[in-house]
Image (cartoon, coloured by chain):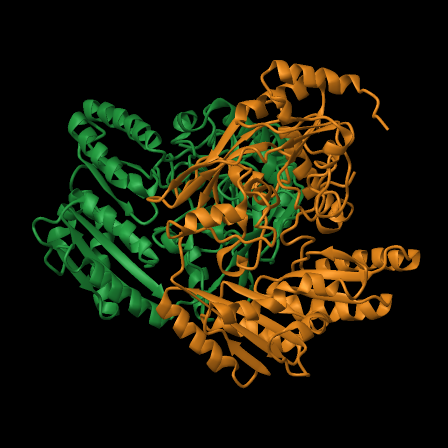
Chain colours: A orange, B green
């Protein structure tokens, strides 16, 4: 069936072609537009139009035109977001930054990369590693997600324990305001107190304040050595105490991932080693840095937990390391066997609250009679909570929805936050006021209004509608 | 001479006494008010009134009353600021947070301190160190400056090289808006992407957006060992290359201070060791962390520079460490012998630009015929530039002023920033637009307006007036 012509779309396309956009940069057909209206939440709304600017002047042109016509703009990277942050409206224009993917500079002396937003995170990591440098943030999506998307959602990853999240590496930005004017913030200086920190304000703002066109990223020298260990514990409390003990004993792992007993059961049979039957929680610990440090800390790890842990395996080479990681990597496909669907939240809590949150989620699971599988980043309190269900069963769907509400209540009661690394987007905006009181939300909204008075830049995200 | 009665002052005092403030919390006389109108820039303007709230409700009461009367409010810590950030106007009210100095909680499990803004930085460091914990930010003023002041100016210090500045340790805040309403931002979670990062926006906002009443600070385990070394080099370029080589070779010092040849000449005779005559630049390098790491990195430091450096002394104990630090500590009093006054700026540049900026300042010094003494934080690019002069000589004063303008131009040309750790305050606001273009400044001002529509909270700071 042919889609009826939309006069507004036709008008914009004509203008953009006249302004030098090529046909390949303008996505017009319904099917093609649909490819720019999804993300990892499986929502899918085709926009009025999707545009693929190749440089910042084209971003400016789009914003000026949208301002003239009063149109909504939805910026977008690779669409790997987990909270609907890039989902457009039917009357909005998608601005995909995927064609702006140049690594503009790698300043080896100052260890800073300057990139366009469409650069793939994993590709940047590869390029800098060839120069002996290291860009630590490692969201699970790094093989396809973009730096721009990582910045606007402040993406995390396992290495956040030691290195922090994307925002900790953003030194500066260039961005276009909704009216097409350009701001610059930050610089290549390690210290700077000159006016408000607009860089940190734009990081994690989910594309609601400006379209980022250039990003300065801090790099580190590549670590000399990495050592991976797997530790099995009888209880979550035991594992949580182990995490605390590591940090207190000057062991500073780059990664401390955990798997709960549901997760373990899901992957157990696929593992190339045998986990003791009593295993309730597994920790995957990675230590990196100078060789001498990695060795001494690995020895200390062994000393500290050789009695307490049910099992402690330290990888001796890259092959063994890969085997230990198998447990974690096989997890997402493996838990799909538990139920056809999952509702997946990425709450974060203070480190000390992990055992309590896991135990309360256990009770909740019994209460709603649905499995709740937890795994994630034990070293930074960021837990991926998966309520396993069949969404086609209305009763299960209702119980699942109830569970989410309860999960957020438990999280906030324990001093936690709705999202550790995925953002609020449109999937968690209904819960946003549970976390922040009305004055704080009004203050955030006043900032939004200062940047975007007509609410045309990525509307419907973060704030309850 | 008795000061004439001010009816507005009398009226406010009467109201506050009726609202439960004690006489000790209200500073009325001209002489006493003057004690709340200075800072380290030696400006001194006595305010209409100075108030010393003891709790957050009193802060709220003051803000509500000021809103009712349309009065300006100037928040203030210990008055150790170097850029005039806390200087009031004659018709404004000082809110000194020095009586709000409780350490509310030290959460050892999560390694987070919750404090009121008036806590002295050095006292917090002592209290947490007794628990085996570590609060790294170490501004030179730490014996008397407050955490609140450190947060609003985003204070740095020598240890910023490895640990970052104050802002890197602020996990959350509670603050009162100018209208007396309270916002909360951040939490005890290591990762959080839930709405705009108001915490980072308030850090370094120099008291222009809100009055901070509660601060959550990240703590670290205290380092096991510290090793201090002094290295002498023939040239600034040689020293700068050494800094770069350290970082590239996985040596991650907590401190890399430098002294230029003027600084060295000023302190040379007072040192308990002999510096070679050809010494142009001295580096003071401190490595901390787990013992094994400190030892291996100190060995590496020695290997790398034993030939290149004119002198390399490694302290073997606390006493020798103190002797090495003498050079740095004697500096401020010693350079006072060069000329009766100094104009002191704290520019920061990208690491790689240090030799160039020092060489250009050398030329500038010859051009204006005034000594320019540079020292500071070689590891993070933050340089304390001191133009030495006699301000009572109008010709020197004029040349000094010209020099400041030139120093900022050189800094910005090399990708630097007006302030690494002191802030803009009222002393650098005239230069603010040299660093940021009109759109970026307008964006910051729109944020200011969103928080403080009538410009009553610390007006006259940061932005050019």
The front one of B119 and A130 is A130
Q: What percent of the width, then of the height, locates residue A27?
A: 69, 28
**Relative to residue A50, is residue A420 depicted above or below?**
below
Outermost residue to the left: B277
The number of callouts visible is: 0
Does A345 sit above or below residue A366? above
x, y percent for residue B364? 20, 29
Q: Is residue A452 left or right of residue A43?
A: left
Q: Percent x, y for residue A178?
A: 62, 26
Look at 21% across and 28% down and name the residue there: B392
Q: Quadrant of residue B413?
A: top left
Task: Give the image quarter of residue A465.
Answer: top right
The vertical placement of A208 against A433, above or below, is: above
For this rendering, which residue is in front, A168 or B369? Answer: A168
Q: Position of residue B353 (x, y in %)?
A: 29, 38
Using the rendered view, name the quadrant where residue B453 is placed.
Answer: top right
Residue A251, above or below A121: below
Looking at the picture, tell me which residue is in the foreground, B55 or A335. A335
Of the pair B371 and A208, the residue shown nearer to us: A208
Q: Is residue B243 left or right of residue A411?
A: left
Residue A188 makes an appearance in the image: no
The quadrant of the rendering that contains the N terminus of chain B is: top left
Q: Residue at x 73, y 32 (%)?
A: A33
Q: Which residue occupies the extreme bottom position in the image? A: A307
Residue B242 visible in the current orientation: yes
């Amino acid at each position: 069936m042919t889609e009826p012509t939309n006069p507004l779309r036709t008008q914009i396309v004509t203008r953009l072609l006249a302004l030098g956009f090529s046909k390949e940069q303008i996505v017009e057909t319904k099917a093609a537009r649909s490819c720019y209206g999804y993300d990892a939440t499986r929502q899918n709304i085709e926009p009025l139009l999707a545009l693929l600017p190749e440089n910042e002047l084209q971003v400016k042109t789009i914003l000026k035109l949208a301002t003239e016509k009063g149109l909504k703009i939805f910026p977008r990277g690779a669409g790997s977001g987990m909270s609907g942050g890039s989902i457009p409206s039917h009357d909005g224009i998608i601005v995909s930054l995927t064609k702006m993917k140049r690594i503009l500079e790698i300043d080896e002396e100052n260890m800073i990369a300057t990139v366009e937003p469409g650069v793939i995170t994993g590709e940047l990591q590869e390029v800098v590693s060839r120069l002996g440098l290291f860009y630590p943030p490692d969201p699970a999506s790094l093989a396809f997600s973009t730096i721009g998307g990582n910045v606007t959602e402040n993406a995390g990853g396992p290495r956040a324990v030691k290195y922090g999240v994307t925002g900790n590496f953003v030194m500066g930005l260039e961005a276009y305001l909704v009216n097409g004017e350009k701001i610059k913030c930050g610089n290549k200086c390690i210290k700077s107190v000159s006016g408000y920190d607009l860089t940190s304000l734009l990081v994690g703002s989910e594309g609601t304040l400006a379209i980022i066109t250039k990003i300065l990223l801090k790099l580190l020298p590549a670590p000399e050595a990495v050592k991976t260990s797997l530790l099995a514990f009888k209880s979550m409390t035991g594992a949580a105490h182990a995490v605390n003990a590591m940090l207190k004993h000057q062991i500073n792992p780059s990664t401390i991932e955990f798997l709960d007993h549901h997760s373990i059961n899901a992957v157990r049979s696929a593992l190339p080693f045998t986990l003791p039957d009593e295993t309730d929680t597994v920790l995957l610990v990675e230590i990196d840095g100078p060789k001498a440090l990695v060795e001494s800390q690995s020895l200390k790890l062994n000393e500290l937990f050789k009695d307490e842990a049910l099992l402690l395996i330290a990888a001796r080479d890259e092959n063994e390391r890969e085997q230990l990681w198998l447990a974690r990597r096989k997890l997402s496909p493996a838990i799909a066997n538990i139920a056809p669907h999952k509702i997946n939240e990425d709450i974060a809590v203070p480190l000390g609250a992990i055992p309590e949150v896991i135990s309360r989620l256990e009770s909740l699971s019994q209460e709603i009679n649905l499995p709740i599988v937890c795994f994630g980043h034990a070293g930074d309190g960021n837990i991926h909570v998966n309520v396993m269900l069949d969404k086609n069963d209305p009763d299960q769907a209702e119980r699942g929805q109830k569970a989410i509400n309860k999960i957020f209540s438990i999280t906030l009661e324990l001093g936690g936050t709705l999202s550790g690394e995925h953002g609020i987007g449109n999937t968690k905006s209904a819960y946003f006021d549970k976390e922040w009181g009305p004055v704080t939300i009004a203050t955030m909204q006043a900032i939004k209004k200062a940047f975007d008075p007509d609410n045309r830049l990525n509307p419907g995200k973060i704030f309850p509608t």
